[in-house]
Image: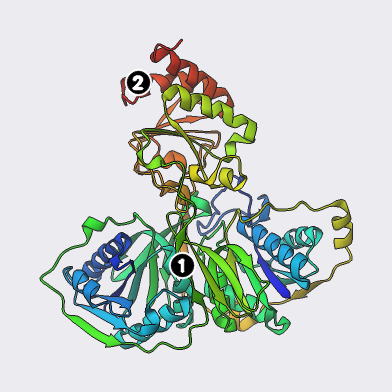
Amino acid sequence: MSNGILVFIEHRNGAVSKTSLEAIAAAQSLGSQLQQQVSAVILGVDPDAMAQGIAAYDLAKVVSASNAKLASYTPDGYTDAVEKVVRQLDPQLVVMSHTYLVRDFGPKLAARFEKSLISDCIRTQVAEGSVTFTRRIFLGKLDADVVSDGKAPVFVTFQSGAYRPDQAVKGSGAPIEKREVEVGEIRMSPEPPFQEVKQAVDLSKAEIIVAIGRGIKSKENIALAQKLADVLGGDIAASRPICDAEWLPIDRQIGSSGQTVAPKLYIALGISGAIQHLVGMKNAGTIVAINKDPEAPIFDIADYGVVGDLFEAVPVLTEEIKKIKGLS
Amino acid sequence: MKIIVMMKQVASKDAILRISKDGTWIEEGDLSFEVNESDGYALEEALRVREKLGGEVLVCAMGPQRAKSVIKDALARGADRAIHIVGDNLTHLSPYAAASALAEAIRDEQPDLIMTGLQSDDYGYAQTGVIMAELLGMPHATIVIEVDASGDKLRVKRELESGWYQWYSMPTPALLTIQSGISQIRYATLKGIMAAKKKEIKEVVPPAEIVGRPSHQRLKRVYLPQKTKQTQLLGNGDAKAGAVALAERLHVEARVI
């Protein structure tokens, strides 16, 4: 009989990632509602030191699974290793964070059990011992409740920010179970990770950001947003499509693949607010959205919204701010 | 090199979505559809590899007859032929079931490379490609932004989080999921559109044991997201009035200017 919850711990450069603490928080929350014990698994050549750190959390045990082939991440290596641990522990639920790494091997892992992940969940609801998982669909426009009808284990991943790292509950020291895991042939060979030429623009310290999205329509129209940014003494930034089109350089991109920012004022012009963008700016102090689509997800996190044509609104806003600042 | 590109038809980005009467999906009757964004980039990348190395580009799409528009568009842009897995009730397949149906439809083609978009713009599960690779016994790489297929081994650049990247090498056959924005997508030329009319579109039916199997994950309800923040909507539909009110609130209330 399947029992318990297993949470997967991710690490980079010898440090457990913050999202793993979010995963622990998610697993603990489900564990207490389902009255199930939570165990953690961490992989590596010698992950014992990191396992020690994880053992400080309120867990039934920490599995420290080692193999020389786990020195760097590969989907083949990680899938084999986690599969072995899942088969041995036979949990009801396997909880992971929806990171780029988990997106790379998680579906492969689930496929070994003839199923998929319930991926990128934002919250859960437990009733009568069964879990309803909620995830965003249609680029954030709608929510969907998903249930699992199949046999254990259920594989679930949570979106970054669905739980807070500080919600992970500390315990009295979980036992560490060291084990060698078997890993088969690794077909892919990774080279060391790297950053592109040092980013010229560091938006992480910007106080005011004016960001543009698809709604700006053409490269020429960026001048309109730039004027607003100039009047505010702020920086210009963009969502991914703008940088993909090379209307602005990539170091102006905000979101999961670009920069993460937390200015005191963030003005989103013609940005619909796909989750990949929101994760990069949702911690801004005051968020303003100007968008013609009243259902754009950006309005869900905006403090102030103007539903309408940004080409009408922005020049007026620029003039009004000039007046307030005594610039005109 | 034989490359198969998996392409999905999804609701247009600008489409107004209305929830269906039974509350488990959206009304599709009068909806406009388009190709899934990152799948378009996967096709472009496949065409570029073929231009460099020669070979053949196939497209494969699954869905009702309306999905033909995605296939025809891909053929007009330069794909050589297509496989259409035809079915009317395939929307609710789990990623595992969808990947199983797709893998079976292309298995006999024995491609050197399969390319997919990194995720769909409707469900956004981001899994179908990876599961296909597992079912076909191929190595894979996700969130790929550069492909070098000229060498002995395939070498691809993957996007990691927060501005980090990593190169991976692997033998072919392999499967890659492609990130949006990897290159500029070409337009279909008039000549391409005319040529597409003569290209083969093979229709296949998905195996009943795959699409008929009860799904291990089920979509119970679809609804508008609950707001997490109280948004003050200004201007009541008048953009200019909204802008005036906004400047005032930012100054007096939020005190950020």
Q: Nearer the viewer, residue B250 or A296?
A: B250
- What kind of colouring is applied to the model shown? rainbow
Residue B253 point in image, percent of width and height = 31, 23
Quadrant of image for the N terminus of chain A: bottom left
| Residue with the mark numbered 2 | B251
Please give the name of the residue rendered at 41% of the width and 49% of the height, measured from the top-left corner: A279
What's the mark number on residue A103?
A: 1
**Crowd around label 2: few <14 · some 14–19 · many ≥20 (10 Å):** some
Q: Is residue B86 visible?
A: no
Q: Secondary structure at mark 1?
A: helix
Depth order, front residue of A241/B106: A241
Identity of the residue furthest to the front in this view? A197
Residue B5, percent across and down? Answer: 68, 68
Q: Can residue B247 be seen in the rendering of this structure?
A: yes
Q: Name the residue at 22% across, 56% down.
A: A166
**Residue B136 lies in quadrant:** bottom right
Amino acid on which the number 1 mark rests in the picture = Arg
Residue at mark 2 to residue at mark 1: CA–CA distance: 43 Å
Q: Are marks 2 and 1 in contact (CB under 8 Å)?
A: no
Helix, strand, or loop for circle 2? helix
